[in-house]
Image (cartoon, grey):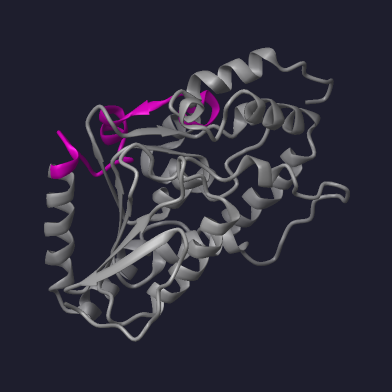
Amino acid sequence: MSETNVTYTYDTLSVALQDGVLYATISNPPVNVMTLGLYADLVDFTAKVAADDAVRVVVMQSADPEFFIAHFDVSVILTFPIDTAPERATSLSPFHTMCELMRTMGKPTIAKLAGRVGGGGNEFAAACDMRFGVRDRTIINQMEVPLGILPGGGGTQHLPRLMGRSRALEVILGAEDLDAETAERWGYLNRIFPDTATLDSFVERLALRMAAWPAGAVALAKASVLNAEPPMTEGLLDEAFLFQQTLRLPAARINMQAAMDQGAQTRAGEARIGALMAEVAAGAEQPAGT
């Protein structure tokens, strides 16, 4: 058993460190919506784990076999202020910083997506180094555009890099459920497995294998791979600015509230979120200039 001097105590995350592999298990019923509580826990967790020398590999997983993280809390987005003109920030938001730490920290980060993942939860998973899923169970949905907004947590930047521009646009603008087989074929998922037990076994073996290598070599190899990609910061700052603009579109408030009224963030609603988004868009009376 590995030892760490860092304290990981959270309401929505349970953390266990074994042989250099840190397992962080998300539990925020009913569907692991990224509420302010889960968001705050993830922000603190990512900052701590990035600096914890006892941790060689990070594995993110869920206590709920049907949901990794549903999405960011729509009821919170509805409270974001829109009474002033949007301004382009000069530094990354806490959400972008959190995701960038998962992408750039000097240790491998893995997301185990055994069930549904969507919205901001999918953006968090996309920032991880690797994603693994389960055939006929893992489902990805980027549902922001039907709500009148856009993926503002890195999705417009990560998805094109992972699956290509055209496929990313299909995922973002189509907002339909993406099955595990397609997500693997498109490059979003590294691999898919026939069941959760096989997923667990593979990820554990891979994580322990990487944790056994010299930590400095792992960190420098990851840094070198990151150098093959274009810089991310400017794109994230532009994304945040454009997201602020969408919040001020009349359709955004209408569609987000309609989604909440029609069952978003309940287990029944989230299990059919792609269809629910189509119903929201079809039923909402859109004002001019949406």
Give the percent coordinates (x, y) of residue 243. 68, 45
Image quadrant occupied by the N terminus: bottom left
Residues in magenta, as a range: 170-197
In this orientation, which residue lies closer to the viewer: 194 or 144?
Answer: 194
Q: x, y (%) of residue 15? A: 33, 66
> Residue 178: x percent and y percent?
38, 28
State the residue in front, 110 or 42: 42
248 relative to 186 in the view: left or right? right
| Front-most of residues 107 and 33 | 33
Lateral position of residue 203 relative to residue 155, left or right: left
Left or right, residue 216 beside residue 228: left
Q: Residue at x 50, y 18 (%)?
A: 275
- Residue at image coords 19%, 41%: 196
What residue do we see at 56% from left, 58% from top? Answer: 37
- Above or below: residue 220 compared with residue 271: below
Q: In which quarter of the image is residue 251?
A: top right
- Tell whether position 192 is magenta: yes
- Residue depicted at x 28% and y 31%: 137
